[in-house]
Amino acid sequence: MILDFETLKFVWWILVGVLFIGFAVTDGMDMGVGTLLPFLGKNDDERRVIINTIGPHWDGNQVWLITAGGAIFAAWPLVYATAFSGFYFAMLLALFALFFRPVGFDYRSKIADQRWRSAWDWGLFIGGAVPALVFGIAFGNLLQGVPFHLDDLLRPYYTGSFFGLLNPFALLVGLISLGMLTMHGAIWLQLRTEDPVSTRAKQWAKVTGLATIAAFALAGLWLTFFIDGYRVVSMPPIDAVPNPLTKEVVIDGGAWLANYRDYPLTLLFPILGFAGLGFAISLSMKDRAGLGLIMSGMGIAGIIMTAGAAMFPFIMPSSTNPGSSLIAWDATSSHLTLTVMFWAAAIFIPIILLYTTWTYARMWRRVTVAEIKSQDTLAY
């Protein structure tokens, strides 16, 4: 079966979204655990318990981020070039923060010195909280438009600054990202640990979950009434050779709501976001953390899909030259490239999902202080 060019462009917009959701639900959980580490663990044994709940999985989960970056590079090369240059310092900040994770996991417990271990606990906190915040800030800037333009040779020129990214709306979206991943990690800890860590995690799940719901609602109102969206006025046929400069784009106050008006089923996405987080909090409070974790993941997916549906077909709108905006129809690779990637994804993504599910099932247990003490030199 050979898919036509138009269909492949839409399919890859969906697949990249799936990769980001997979990253947020799996590695985002690990980041949430790292964010909570200095606060939930009251002594070294408890902190080792917290670390070992994600010890077998964190590196495999992080592959989702690498895969998403590779997919953007291959499917949307112009987006990759523009985003990784425009958000260069923000990406470096996230990358340097992520460096704390492998070193912290492997070396934290090698030396029985309280100052050494405490320093790495805060390193793991940075490795969890900073990337979660930065990724949200980046998406908040996408919703407002990014200051860049393309020249006649399609070379991107970013005209903004790092501190320009730290605007109020972007920071709010960053807090949504940090809050939802921290809640997800808290419910994971509630499920995988025993008291008193489990009880503390339950309280953090409630606080961070309610804060995320409030921030998500505030961001929706802010986006509706105070932020202009983007709308494509005219463009060549969707199956034409991709060229971002051949379309006309205008800035429109209600453009980010257009898809919700035109396709009412997309309203299920924000409903899923609110309902998923709400049910996750309720189930966590009733000590049904397993179902709560599933609902938390659905809430995260709903929030990401809400933003994606609002922006579609825009991937990276330009605030300085709207005609240079990159969209799903004209920022893609060739038909052949998308086809080869599609079949590779169709084969390997199910294998990855099956393998990941198997590893979680095989290593499923509650991590206890007694276990950590009995395996002092083996556990993280």
Image (tube, helix red, strand yellow):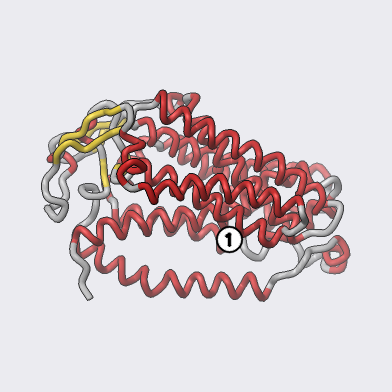
Residue occupying image coordinates x 41% and y 33%: 141
Residue occupying image coordinates x 55% and y 55%: 298
Q: Position of residue 350 (x, y in %)?
A: 45, 73
Q: Secondary structure at mark 1?
A: helix
Q: Describe residue 174's horizontal placement relative to residue 138 as left or right.
A: right
Residue occupying image coordinates x 59% and y 75%: 358
The quarter of the displayed image where residue 8 is located: bottom left
Q: Describe residue 178's horizontal placement relative to residue 162 as left or right.
A: right
Quadrant occupied by the C terminus: bottom right
Q: Residues within 10 Å of mark 1 (few under 14, many from 20)?
A: some
Q: Position of residue 62 (x, y in %)?
A: 53, 57
Q: Position of residue 100 (x, y in %)?
A: 62, 47
Amino acid type for the residue under numbered disc 1? Asp
57 over 246 or under it: above or below? below
Q: Is residue 100 visible?
A: no
86 over 167 or under it: above or below? below
Q: How many marks?
A: 1
Of 74 and 273, nearer the camera is 273
Of 50 and 357, nearer the camera is 357
124 over 64 or under it: above or below? above
Q: Is residue 42 visible?
A: yes
Quadrant occupied by the N terminus: bottom left
The quarter of the displayed image where residue 317 is located: top left
Q: Position of residue 343 (x, y in %)?
A: 31, 71
Residue corresponding to mark 1: 59
Residue occupying image coordinates x 60% and y 34%: 214
